[in-house]
Amino acid sequence: MSLENFIRTVFLHDLRKMVYDANLHYLGIGNISLGIEFLGACLDEYPFNKSGESKKRFKIGIEHFLSKIDPRYSKFNQRSSPYYLYKNLRCGMAHVIRPQGKVHFTSRKESKSDGTKHLCQSEGRLILVCEDFYDHFAQSCKMLIEKLPTLTNIKIKEPYLTIVNHN
């Protein structure tokens, strides 16, 4: 499966169904947080499986994609931020499957009921509304797809995922 097909299938189709159709908001946010690192990995010069690059890749994903949609992503991904998204969102979800610190998740329905908004602070917490977060991530994926033809690293042209059918 090509990189573009992977993005379209996994992020723009399957993850959307998870968030919007199945209302699996918690799992959706976890996958989005890891997907941000994937966006960054597409832009760096290293092989996808190179270890030790997660912080850099997550930052690239934020700076080159999500912060173009909403600059607050960059603000909240600074090490000095009490919400430092790399540590509190990405690492929390990747290592212990829960956010750390003052980052909290909700859905649009709950957010409306609570009077909160995506990327706003409430009672000292940073609120991430799953559907809004997904929409921003999906826009970022589309930005990456548009950029793919201009990327020259060999990893972009190679198949990203091999699916073996055992039938």
Image (cartoon, grey):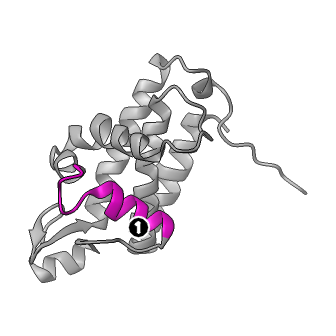
Residue plotted at (14% across, 76% down): 112
Horizontal side of 146 relative to 126 (left or right) equals: right
SS assignment for the magenta stretch, majority: helix
Horizontal side of 131 relative to 122 (left or right) equals: right
The image position of residue 137, as x and y in percent, is 35, 49
Quadrant assignment, res 1 = top right
Q: Is residue 82 magenta?
A: yes
Q: Is residue 77 magenta?
A: no
Residue plotted at (48% across, 59% down): 15
The magenta region covers 78-95
Horizontal side of 48 relative to 96 (left or right) equals: right
The image position of residue 131, as x and y in percent, is 30, 64
Q: Which of 31/13 is in front?
A: 31
Q: From the image, tell me which residue sits under label 1.
A: 92
The image position of residue 48, as x and y in percent, is 59, 38
Circle 1: residue type: Gly
Q: Quadrant of the C terminus?
A: bottom right
User: Mark 1 packing: few (<14 Cα in 10 Å), some, or many (20+)?
Assistant: some
The image position of residue 59, as x and y in percent, is 34, 42
Q: Which of 35/74 is in front?
A: 74
Residue plotted at (31% across, 34% down): 64
Q: Which of 162/125 is in front?
A: 125
